[in-house]
Image: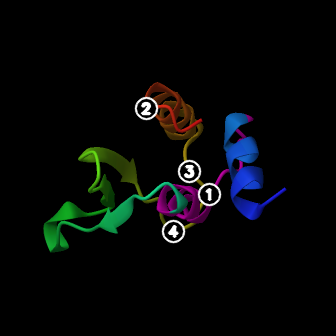
Amino acid sequence: MSKYEKAKERILKKPKDYTYTEAKYLLGKMGFLEYHKGKTSGSRVCFYRERDKRVIMLHKPHPGDEMVRGSVVDLVEYLKCIGEL
């Protein structure tokens, strides 16, 4: 099983300790590019996929890397909705 497949399996479990780094890796493998809007965007990060113009907004956690569980659940539901999971 590839690292990508393992990453998909892990997010489907909606773990409490899911990290932004893991989400960034997974979205990158799905063709999404991280885009910062500049100094005024704060911790909001946009992931954009050119081929179908899909956009995912995430909150980059700080000071740690662990995402809020609700954000993980929302991300899983969105990725299911667009057919990626």
Q: Which residue is mark 2?
A: 82
Mark 3 closeness class: few <14, some 14–19, many ≥20 residues within 10 Å: many
Is disc 4 in contact with disc 3, using a CB cutoff of under 8 Å?
no
Element at label 3: loop
Element at label 2: loop
Q: Position of residue 72 (x, y in %)?
A: 56, 40
Instruction: Pick the residue in front: 80 or 23.
Output: 80
Q: Amino acid at mark 2?
A: Ile
Which labelled disc corresponds to residue 67? 3
Q: In this picture, which residue range is highlighted in magenta? A: 13-28
| Above or below 42: residue 81 | above
Q: Amino acid at mark 1?
A: Thr
Which labelled disc corresponds to residue 19? 1
Q: Which residue is mark 4?
A: 63
Mark 4 closeness class: few <14, some 14–19, many ≥20 residues within 10 Å: few
Instruction: Pick the residue in front: 7 or 20.
Output: 7
Asked whether, in this view, residue 10 is left or right of residue 1, the answer is left
Camera-nearest label, 4 or 1 = 1
Asked whether, in this view, residue 12 is left or right of residue 42, the answer is right
Camera-nearest label, 4 or 3 = 3
Q: Position of residue 67 (x, y in %)?
A: 56, 50
Mark 4 or 1 closer to N-term? 1
Element at label 1: loop
Mark 3 or 1 closer to N-term? 1
- Tell me the residue at 17%/73% (across/down): 39
Mark 4 or 2 closer to N-term? 4
